[in-house]
Amino acid sequence: MSRWLFFLIVGLLLPLQSIAKTVVVGSKAFNEGYLLGEIIAQKLAHDGFDVERKLGLGKTIITYEALKQGEIDVYVEYTGTLAQAILKLENTPSLKVLQQRAKKEGLKVLPRLGFNNTYALVISEQIAKQNNISSISDLVNHPDLSLGISHEFLKRKDGWQPLAAAYDLPYQPVGIEHSLAYQAIANEQIAITDAYTTDGDIARYQLRILKDDKQFFPRYDAVPLIRNDADPALINSLQALANRIDEAKMQQLNSQVVNDDQSFAEVAEQFLIDEALIKSKSSESQDLNSPWQLLPRYIVEHLQLTILALICSCLVGIPLSIAVYRQPKASRMLVYCTGLLQTIPSIALLALMIPLLGIGWIPAVVALFLYSLLPIVRNTLTALLTLDPVMQQVAVGMGLTPREQLRHVYIPLAVPMIFSGIRTAAIINIGTATLAAFIGAGGLGEPIVMGLSLNDTTLVLFGAVPAALLAIFTEWLFEGVERRFIPAHLRNTLS
Amino acid sequence: MQVDSTLKAAVELRNISLSFDSQPLFQNFSFELPTEKITAIVGASGCGKSTLLKLINGLIQPDDGEIHICGQQVSHNDQAEWRRHMGYAVQQIGLFPHLSAANNVVLLAQLEQWTESSIQERLSYLAEKMGLDQAILSRFPHELSGGQAQRVGLCRAMMLKPPILLLDEAFSAVDPITRMDIYQYFLRLQETEPRTVLLITHDMREAVKLSDHIAVMQQGEIVQFAPVEQVVSQPATDYVARLVQEHI
């Protein structure tokens, strides 16, 4: 009987689970990452999945850990990065070998999307035609052409030096800022520079990618990465994207976002329709709205993160300080430890949180909580330890017990300084919380991260300006509360 | 040391020894405080008079010796408890800045869980005796004049009707005229509510004005302890004579 009941319940729950299960699509924080994430998200949504986007998750380590921990279900990785940065292999093996190695890590590498986004040398189309240059080897015969190489590529271990050695190139390159290199080619100041093969600007500046005929550059094939235990339906749906995007296509899509100011959602949708991968315009694309429409959500998320972290650090920091202030050693340790936390770079602290707490708002709140401990602990301890010696003497002399001294003298007189500690912590939190977007916690960091990856200043300002206003508003708010509740003669802040 | 045999002890120090940084301040020091009288301890700064007061209310522990209060020997542990029976006022007054004058006065009574009516009754009694009106009581310490603050401090010290009152230069921080007024308030209260008062002062004139007995202290020793008239008319040493001469 009970067995039948068990099967009945499982039978009822199974479909429920698969319907209710949401696929979380992640991406790294740069424009191609966002775009591919959006393409995958729309494709999955079209195929009936409930899709949640966690795009713009900072660097490789964050996205990769998020996938491993099950915080996201899929993101697009590059084979070269997978081999070297994640699997720590010496060079980039074939896709088959990569798939075997990744399997041991619990991951599944799906077939290539079709393009190889690697380093390349690009040359002005006109000069290439005139001199009949199509591959890097061809350059050997044209030592008169001028070369401008980005500073990063000049320095990289797998950059200019070994490339020049491998091809025996007869050039003394000049270092140039990557963002200026294309303009320099357009102005005919240089003829050749380094680039990424899917760079949207390649078509725009009419550049030709020189063939890497000696296969010097490692392959960075874009592949969707999922976990071994992924839903077969998910794999099916994603496999439809295999070999749909070649370098030229990716360049064009990137260019539509970077140069034509189209949204990721629009470009992704048009691509999927053109490729007949989805049927028609879905309502899904309205999901990514204009920044103005998203602003309230950003602000609310930002405030949630900040306030929650602040409350936690008050609840922990103040009682902790009160508990230890009579013991000089413990007090010093406490200030020392909270100070040490402060020295960890925020992005590193966020990355350290992922193996413990995954991604999303919980690790973000924990990180912000840790950051705001110092001002609160330090101010509380300072206030308690620097109480006017006359007050201390009178409090004891008149017969107050230690508990009564604390309750009726120390704490009330420490309140103004504790309060200004909370105020400092709140302001720090509002600033630091912008980084929470890197681990998918949302907030005003989201447009900043996206804007940075798109080189879109307006989008960055959509996050930065409200964050600054929020900080100012918070100052005012605290000032008002102080004015209302703390008598003038007890205040000790700048207001 | 001359001791008046008519004195009856409310506070008694027996064979107290105390050193600071291995510099002895008291050696085998004994002293008795007469009950329900005002006793002034007069001496130059550094003579040990404030330390004597802190020994009595336990802010400082003696290296050796016994302290008896109202006939009972007190150990370090109960000393804190005894403090509520020993009102305490100091030169800097030390009113708590976050509490109104009234709340400074009634704090201990509230902690002792007096009823609100007995608190109010006691507060208005003290305020009336010390010439403090309702307007002054509702002010915060930083809004009080020096004389007002001093009187509030004294009210606070006497709120719980302590049998013993310890005053450490408690009248010193105000101008002479205001001080005369406060003396009057204080003596009026002492008349209606007699208690054992230890008055630490460097001012012989104040001691003569207020106290029944004077103990003159010099380098950790009491050189004369006698009723006021006797100290004035028959100074025991040249030092006492000089103190009397210079101040009166």
Image (tube, helix red, strand yellow):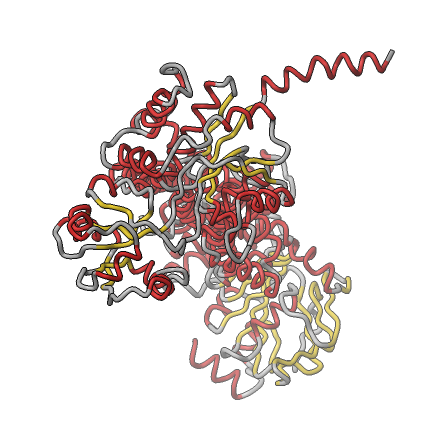
Can residue A289 be seen in the rendering of this structure? yes
Location of residue B60 with respect to A131 vertically, above or below = below
Against B186, is A113 above or below?
above
Q: Nearer the viewer, residue B32 or A180?
A: A180
Residue that lies at the very extreme toward the bottom in this rendered image: B238
Residue in the picture at 64% in, 81% down = B19
Give percent across and percent down for residue B171: 46, 63
The N terminus of chain B sits in image quarter: bottom right
Q: Residue at x 48, y 43 (%)?
A: B102
Q: Is residue A321 above or below residue A229?
A: below
Percent x, y of residue B238: 52, 88
* Residue at 54%, 40% in the rendered image: A66
Q: Residue B237 lies in what quarter of the image?
A: bottom right
Q: Nearer the viewer, residue B244 or B10?
A: B10
Considering depth in this image, is B35 or A50 the residue closer to the camera? A50
Residue at point 62%, 53% (across, down): A323
Number of marks present in the image shown: 0
Residue A194 location (% of width, % of height): 29, 54
Name the image quarter holding the C terminus of chain B: bottom left
Lateral position of residue B66 relative to residue A320, left or right:
right
Q: Is residue B144 visible?
A: no
Q: Position of residue A411 (x, y in %)?
A: 53, 49
In the rendered structure, the answer to whether residue A286 lies left or right of residue A228 reads left
